[in-house]
Amino acid sequence: MNCLEFRRAAGAEPMRPGVEAERHAADCAPCAAHLAELRAMDDTILAALRVDVPVPAAARPVAARTAVAALADRRRWYAFAASIAGGVILGSLLWTSGTRAALARDAVAHMQHEAASMVKTGIPADRGAVDDALARDGVRLRGDPGLVTYVMSCRFRGHTVPHLVVQTSGGPVTVLVLRDERIRRTTKFHEQGYAGSLVRSGPGGLAIIGATDAQVAEAAARVNAALEWVG
Amino acid sequence: MNAPFAGKHGETAFARLCEELRPDLFRFAFWLARDRHVAEDVVQEAMLRAWRSRESLDDSSSVKAWLLTIVRREHARLYERKRHETVPVDDLVNDESPELAVSERREVLDMRRAIFALEPDYREPLVMQVLMGFTTDEIARELGLTQGAVLTRLFRARQQLRRAMGATGTAGEEDA
């Protein structure tokens, strides 16, 4: 084996270059040094590949999960859990309460249950009520989110969340303030004819739903800038 | 037929195995997709599929390879459905930066960026070898390649990473 052949073998499998390659390295100092460098690099590669892993949902009681399961997607997850003794085994393998797509669908479904709130109006919601609903979730307004015309504290995926409707230049937009949803990256979605966005904010995020992307974007920018997460 | 994961005892054994493998399966999916959220979705779906099919496994020693295949297929399925738009590598890495442990060495961060930038044909076999511990023979079977092709891709992956990390070329080193 010559040096070129050695470097190809070592470059492909530094940890197991083969008997011939090991023999070559024993007699060739530059190649031995090259192998050592490759092996050190592989340690760095492995460290780099070991990114943080999300922790799966704690094994919540099946009954509690089932109580909030409203959509086919979630029922599919928990049907498996419920079919197993205690529902703990499969539940412990899953991430949080579903995928981002499931969060988007749940948010739209929740908005649709309170569709009467999505009206174009100039009548503001009571500021005290808005502050109270947000404060219950450890959030306060430090800026102008736009005209808030509806506020409610709602049950959503097992938590009580502030549900706002904010008026944009194009029409009303629903904003759910979701402290307990891990939204790591802002993403857009389109669901059942609505435009939406899951917006990274504070420790959780916002689910924003409107008729058009432009309305959603306008509300997302204003509301996210106006919120202050405390505690 | 031996079905090691059948019945209640099998469920527990299977779940325990999945739990042990889950971190590396997530990491594998992450490096396929280069997106944490996609990786979560992929592994979530893969786990469900694996759970449904666990009784078809007749060899407990092949679970890792079997799960990896499911993850790859779920990624391919998701990728076809969603057609993720191309995101600049810097954006991908910068998005991940808040999640990096404070104690990560600069070298590790630089290597992560370099791996992000590898094209999939080089990145995937490298991840399978270094992270998942597969032999080149196993990688060849999984990817439908010859062993020679796998060796070439691994060599080129490391060559590119060495260059990215600032290593100068070695006399006589050529592309395989």
Image (cartoon, rainbow, N blue to C red):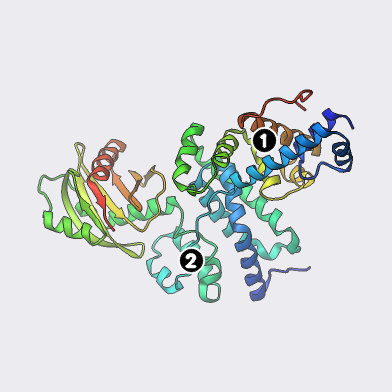
* Neighbour tally class for label 1: few under 14, some 14-19, many 20 plus, Cα within 10 Å: some
Q: Which residue is mark 2?
A: A78
**View extreme (front): residue:** A29
Element under disc 1: helix
Identify the chain of the residue marked 1, using the numbered disc in the image.
B
Query: Where is residue A47 shown, x and y percent of the image?
Result: 61, 47
In the image, A84 versus B62, the foreground residue is: B62
Query: Which of the two marks, 2 or 1, is nearer to us in this view?
Result: 1
Query: Where is residue B47 shown, x and y percent of the image?
Result: 58, 58
Q: Looking at the rendered structure, which numbered label has been put on residue B55?
A: none
Q: Quadrant of residue A19?
A: top right
Q: Which residue is mark 1?
A: B122
Query: Where is residue A97 shown, x and y percent of the image?
Result: 44, 60
Can residue A42 be seen by looking at this rendering? Answer: yes
Badge 2 amino acid: Tyr
In the image, A30 versus A70, the foreground residue is: A30
Q: Quadrant of residue A112?
A: bottom left
Left or right of A182? Residue B88 is right
* Neighbour tally class for label 2: few under 14, some 14-19, many 20 plus, Cα within 10 Å: many
Query: Where is residue B152 shown, x and y percent of the image?
Result: 76, 33
Badge 1 amino acid: Tyr
Residue at 61 percent of width and 32 percent of height: B165
